Image (spheres, rainbow, N blue to C red):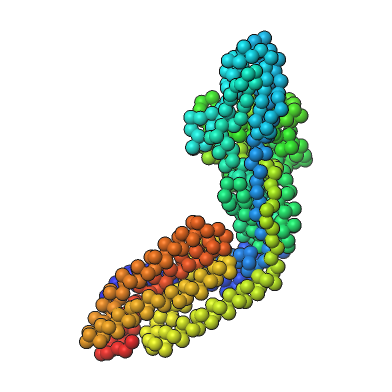
Amino acid sequence: MQIPLWKRVIILGLCALGVILAMPNLFYNRVETHNAAAAKIARNGSTPELAKQLAEWPSWLPSSIVNLGLDLRGGAHLLAEVHLSNVYADRMNALWPEVRDALAKERATVGNVRREPSDPSVLKVSISKPEAMATALQTVRGLARPVVSLTGVGQKDLQVTAAGNSITIQLSPAEKAATDQRTMQQSLEIVRRRIDAAGTREPTIQQEGSDRILIEVPGIGSAEQLKALIGTTARLTFNKVVGRTSDAHAIPGAGNSLVPSEDQKGLYYIIDDTPVVTGEDLTDAQPSFDQNGQPAVDFRFDTTGARKFGDYTATHIGQPFAIVLDNKVISAPVIQAHIAGGSGIITGNFTVQSSTQLAVLLRAGALPAKMSFLEERTIGPELGADSIRAGRIAAVVGTIAVVVFMVAVYGFFGWIANLGLALNMCMMFGALSLIGATLTLPGIAGIVLTVGMAVDGNVLVYERIREELRAARGPARAIELGYERALSAIIDANLTTMISAGILYFVGTGPVRGFAVTLGLGILTSVFTTVWLSRLMIVMWFERRRPKSIEV
């Protein structure tokens, strides 16, 4: 019954914080309009209309809200399959000129070189002098590079074998795994950039399995509209850098543009409007290592792009050039030497992860592989409104039933449990808002379930207090023993449910995860309100009233 002042301040402070964080959800439309305007201003600058929308909600108040999922707001759902085998074929087609040129230097030894028909993911080359196969194999294997991945350390990216007068070249298993991972990352990045550019709110874009992407965008008109949005290609250009500045309102001059840096906030590049080459000329970009063993990025252009880029680098050695993606400079390396042949390397303070990410962004001008849609659904806003209405009714009915039951069975102590239940709901919505969680219809089911679970701990405590009162304990001692002896049962019951919620979250996807999130947060907040908050309220009441006897 002795709770120190510092502990009381923490308990009441956490409750107040939960109420403050949950409050924006009471003004959902206003806060949502404010947040959308803030995002547009950050992306494109302010306008009078956006400034008016921004003023819908005070900037000094929290503005995080619980996002409504697809089944509550309506929108489009797509399940896409990425054809990873297309990437293997592209790699082999890009490798063929290198193999041909390398063997051409040994023509006196290996004879004529010809590409043979084969599976698209395999490059098959024949030489006219089979007796020189050892030399040919050594030459081709010299083109292999280290696999750039944490799991492929020390392995090469090419697997080269010989049979008769033919050489078979394909990606090694380690490189295939790394390529699959990079391709999926690239596809996710492209889809995310395309959808974000359209200004949609809180989309769900995640990988499912090894080659599928789940895309859910609330508020969009139809699945066809979403497919058209994903099909839009990104704008990738390589431009001359005229200068750099930290002034966001600097005048770039005629024929130039002011473009922000992707990584360095507050830095702007002045670039020439006419690109040297564009993403349409880029055939490949892969993470690699430079001559010092440091992570870098290799890139390769097609014939037209190679000529234009080679001419430019020959006359601009020592000068930076900008790699611009979707009107943002993602990198501005300095040209170290004339880059002929259509391939080059970007060096810098890279890690393996950052070089892989830059390679993904460089290739993000178009999808790396064909994407087919296995499943598509359009959910109308009317259905979402019906779901919200049904969920609200279920929550209200469930809450009223619990409140009435607690008061009917436990009287005054039931009112304390109900007050704890109200603060528990506030804390749960505050936590959901803070982490930016998406609420789905199964998530509402998790909330309704939490309503019952939130008073379950109080029931255990009150029954223990009743037992102690029947054993002729005094009021203070009965309350103290009731909380002490019910604690283990409360922890055990909620811990086993938390384990189930954790399994649902890590194994499940989509709506199942939404249920697991609300259930897990509900368990944490209900344990807090039962073990600490309701106990504090009873102690504060007991200190004021000093009753000689109590009735639970």
Q: Residue at x 54, y 32 (%)?
A: 147
Q: Residue at x 50, y 63 (%)?
A: 517
x, y (%) of residue 340? Answer: 69, 23
Residue 481 visible in the snapshot: yes
x, y (%) of residue 321? Answer: 66, 33
- Foreground residue among 436 and 139: 139
x, y (%) of residue 317? Answer: 66, 25
Q: As drawn, which residue projects farthest toward the top? A: 108
Report the number of discs: 0
x, y (%) of residue 508? Answer: 52, 58
185 left or right of 450 in image: right
Identify whether 55 is placed above or below 534.
Answer: above
Q: As drawn, which residue projects farthest toward the left? A: 472
Q: Residue at x 37, y 69 (%)?
A: 493
Q: Quadrant of residue 91?
A: top right
Identify whether 477 is placed above or below 527.
Answer: below
Q: Quadrant of residue 355?
A: top right
484 left or right of 335 in image: left
- Foreground residue among 29 and 93: 93
